Amino acid sequence: MKTILKIKGMHCASCKALIEDVCKDVQGVEACNVDLKEEKAVLVHKTPNEVKKAKQEIEALGRYKVTL
């Protein structure tokens, strides 16, 4: 499955790397590709549960707001 997450608060390559890393650590997430310019991430995952967990993990970083 693929889901597009809109992410507010990203501003640099470090933000991109941090979000991709935290998403890839979520069990069931196969890939995460962040596009800084478009303020979005494409999440490749097995079930809808991973989307909720990835959203929680990104927002737990304290800098970002995630919407679907």
Image: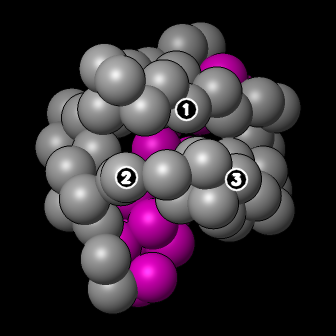
Residue identified by numbered label 2: 11
Q: Amino acid at mark 1?
A: Val
In percent of width and height, residue 56 lies at 40, 70
Q: Residues within 10 Å of mark 3 (few under 14, many from 20)?
A: some
Q: Earlier in the sequence, mark 3 or mark 1?
A: 3
What colour scheme has been applied to the protein in the rendered image?
Answer: one colour
Quadrant (top left, top right, bottom left, bottom right) of the C terminus: top left
Q: Residue at x 30, y 32 (%)?
A: 39
Determine if the magenta segment contains residue 8: no
Q: Amino acid at mark 3?
A: Ala
Q: CA distance from mark 3 to mark 1?
A: 8 Å
- Closest to the camera, between mark 2 and mark 3, is 2
Q: CA distance from mark 1 to mark 2?
A: 12 Å
Quadrant of residue 3 within the rendered picture: top left
Q: Residues within 10 Å of mark 2 (few under 14, many from 20)?
A: few
Judged left or right of residue 53, residue 31 is right
Residue identified by numbered label 3: 17
Dot 2 falls on a residue whose secondary structure is loop
Magenta stretch: dominant SS? helix
Are the residues flagged by discs 3 and 1 in contact, CB closer than 8 Å? no
Quadrant (top left, top right, bottom left, bottom right) of the N terminus: top right
Quadrant of residue 46 within the rendered picture: top right
Residue identified by numbered label 1: 34
